[in-house]
Image (tube, grey):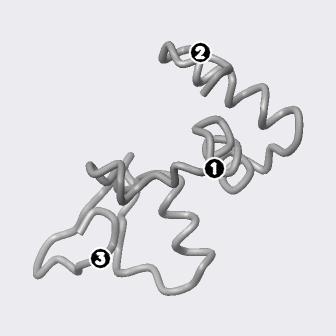
Amino acid sequence: MIVGLEEPDAGEIRIGGRAMAGIPVSKRDRLERAKSVQMVFQDPYLSLDPRIPAGRAIEDVLTLHTGRTGAAATDRALELLTAVGLGRST
């Protein structure tokens, strides 16, 4: 219900004081919801593409959600990887 796959039978779901009403239909609505909440699948073999380095995957998300591109996305991805102990080689 939180990510919008199911509708609640009653009541409402709020995140940060904002109602998360209904299942998002348009791409714009889905992207807007994804900025505040996303699913994290627990099986890395189904969730992560082994051909794509973690840094590149993070860069793609940064580009999609923040508009950062090129060096700005790469630099921020490296900051995030370093913060969790992975660094540049990932």
Residue 68 lies, in percent from the top left, at 80, 43
Q: What's the amino acid at mark 3? A: Leu
Q: Residue placed at 74% from the left, 50% from the top?
A: 63
Q: Secondary structure at mark 3?
A: loop
x 11%, y 81%: residue = 9
Q: CA distance from mark 2 to mark 3?
A: 33 Å
Residue receiving disc 1: 61
- Give the CA distance from mark 1 to mark 2: 17 Å
From the top left corner, tell me how far across and down residue 86 is, in percent. Answer: 53, 19
Quadrant of the rendered structure where residue 6 is? bottom left
Q: Nearer the viewer, mark 1 or mark 3?
A: 1
Is label 2 in a helix, a strand or a loop? helix
Label 3 packing within 10 angstroms: few (<14), some (14-19), many (20+): few
**Given contact means CB atoms under 8 Å apart, are the residues at marks 1 and 3 in contact?**
no
Characterize the local packing of mark 1: few (<14), some (14-19) or many (20 or more) Cα atoms within 10 angstroms.
Answer: some
The mark that comes first in sequence, 1 or 3, is 3
Q: Earlier in the sequence, mark 1 or mark 2?
A: 1
> 54 left or right of 60?
left
* Mark closer to the observer (1, 2): 2
Q: Quadrant of the C terminus?
A: top right
Which quarter of the rendered picture does the N terminus lie within? bottom left
Choose top left, top right, bottom left or bottom right for residue 76: top right
Q: Which residue is mark 2?
A: 82
Kind of residue at badge 2: Thr
Please give the label number shown on residue 1. none
Q: Amino acid at mark 1?
A: Val
Numbered label attached to residue 5: 3
> Mark 2 or mark 3, which is nearer to you?
2
